[in-house]
Amino acid sequence: MSLSFLAAAVAFQRGHTLTFVRHGETVANATGKYNSKTLNALSKRGQSQASALTQELLRQPRFDTILVSPAPRAMGTIAPYLRATHTQAVIWPLLYECCTGRRPKDAHATHFGFGARIRIPNEFAGLFRLIPGHDRYPQADKYNEGLCQVDASLSEYKSLYAKGRVLMVGHSGHGGHFIHALTGKWRKVENAIPIDVSSLLH
């Protein structure tokens, strides 16, 4: 058992819980056509998934912290819940999608950087906030760079956010790798289906 896994287990034993949710289905997911117009637009099914997710989360105790990817598709998925609960979420850049390409045989974490400044769309004004100094998209275009981003997100999560009830809204690639890094287990990450990450440590 790795030291990082042991550290994660200790954190959860102290009452910390984590729920992970991938964004709802997008037009790109539905059609297989990925471009600037389809990548962040929720499909009709994705909009229904966001509504169903809202109702499911409303039946649960309130979250102490909600962390969301800077991708508009992630914001759009959790926005109905934020409006219903009058809650504001934190945009966490390290949740941005990565590790989506073919895994190389010698996969290992290398390095990644940060690029364009994150902008919150006007339609989501007041629902999300950016933390000063954490307001740029990560740049991890290659698989190994993405693994470095995952490592960075795990380290920052444990140092800044691993307390109380946490909801994390992200993506399939980064999300799957993050959950594996935290728990030692792989889970299929489906659109708008909450994963109780805490239970994977038992």
Image: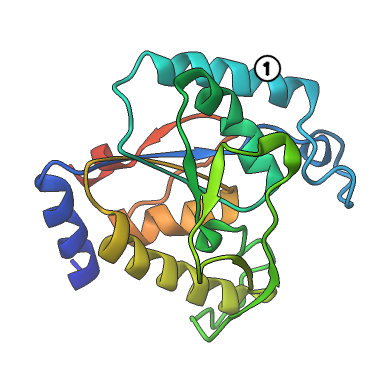
Q: Nearer the viewer, residue 196 or 84?
A: 84
Side of 115 where 178 appears, left or right: left
Give the residue at the far bottom of this rendering: 110
The answer to which of 138 and 91 lies nearer the viewer is: 91
Q: Looking at the picture, how far across and down is residue 173, in whole percent?
A: 58, 55
Q: Residue at x 62, y 53 (%)?
A: 70
Front residue of 188/50: it is 50
Query: The N terminus lies in which quarter of the figure?
Result: bottom left
Left or right: 66, with 22 as reference point: left
What kind of colouring is applied to the model shown? Answer: rainbow
Q: Residue at x 47, y 25 (%)?
A: 86
Q: Quadrant of the C terminus?
A: top left
Relative side of 10 to 154, left or right:
left
Residue 167 in picture, x, y percent from top left: 39, 39
Amino acid type of the residue that numbered disc 1 sits on in the rendered structure: Ser
Q: Which residue is mark 1?
A: 48
Q: Residue at x 83, y 35 (%)?
A: 27
Residue 63 location (% of width, % of height): 33, 33
The quadrant in which residue 26 appears is top right
Say left or right for 46 vs 165. right
Task: Give the image location of residue 127, x and y in percent.
Answer: 56, 37
Badge 1 marks a residue whose secondary structure is: helix
Residue under the image location 41 percent in, 72 percent down: 151
Q: Is residue 73 above or below residue 158?
A: above
Label 1, residues with CA under 10 Å away: few <14, some 14-19, many ≥20: some
